Amino acid sequence: MSQYQDGTYLAKNPTWDVEDSPWKAANVIRMMERNHLAPSRIAEVGCGVGEILHQLYQALPEYCSFSGYEISPQAIELCDPRKNERLQFYLGDILDEVLVTPYDLVMVLDVFEHVEDYIGFLRRLRDKAEYKIFHIPLDMSVMSVMHMSPILNARNKVGHLHYFCKETALATLQDNGYQILDSFYTSGPVNRPPRTMMQKSRLVDLVKAKVFAKNPDKWVRILGGSLMVLAK
């Protein structure tokens, strides 16, 4: 039994990173708006405690319905207070579902780096929806390789088995039949989880923002980050 099913992951991560959910949902909406997407049936693979879907439920039109798939029984229990007629949660793997009609949009947010056979996972996921939004940690950076502790922490605490930079993340999706439509960083001094934002002076924030804006690829290649991707 995996750490996600036997309670080990919950013991290591008691909040299931729910505090990042409003920020992740906002970035999903940003991606949808950038690409003029108006999905009516939305699913999330590895939905955790369901707060990202709950945030989207509150923000998107009433014609939208939401389905969350999660293999952790502990997480599904924590989803229960959030479910309603338009927002449902399922204990199981979406890959095992025989869908009569594919979803309009499937979200895979910080998931496939945890999956042992991530190649097989991505290939089987492809037909579950017309559009897919991925959020991918970019663990492979100059700083992480130099110090190694960030990579080992990602492995030991949150279960990352695979480590990507922007280029290998996008190549992985393309090699498995995905068409990349759009991408942007969710990292750097401007767009990152609120819990990781250090309180600095406005001048320091301004300088960092200007440096990042000048060469975001170099910033992330050196310091790491994460990437939001829209694909078909």
Image: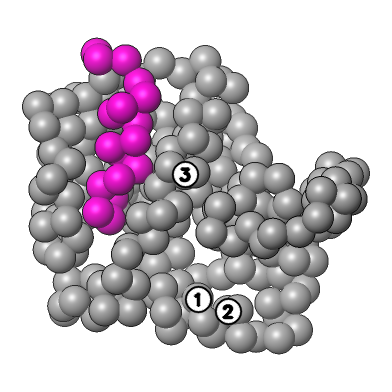
Which sits in the foreground, 217 or 7?
A: 7
Q: What element carries label 3?
A: helix
Q: Position of residue 226 (x, y in %)?
A: 60, 55
Residue labelled with disc 1? 154
Q: Do the residues labelled 1 and 3 touch (CB within 8 Å)?
A: no
Q: Residues within 10 Å of mark 3 (few under 14, many from 20)?
A: many
Q: Which of marks 1 and 3 is in front?
A: 3
195 up-or-down from 35: above or below: below
Q: Do the residues labelled 2 and 1 touch (CB within 8 Å)?
A: yes
Tell me where the magenta segment starts and ends, as one range. 47-63
Which sits in the foreground, 126 or 112?
A: 112
Residue at 24 percent of width and 13 percent of height: 63
Residue 107 falls left or right of residue 87: right
Q: The N terminus lies in which quarter of the figure?
A: bottom left
| First of labels 1, 3 by sequence position | 3
Residue labelled with disc 3? 24
Which sits in the foreground, 153 or 232?
A: 153
Q: Are marks 3 and 2 in contact (CB under 8 Å)?
A: no
Residue at 25 percent of width and 54 percent of height: 49
Q: What element carries label 1?
A: helix
Distance between mark 2 and mark 1 Cα atoms = 5 Å
Q: What amino acid is at disc 2?
A: Ile
Mark number for residue 151? Answer: 2
| First of labels 3, 2 by sequence position | 3
Count of marks placed on residues? 3
Mark number for residue 70? Answer: none
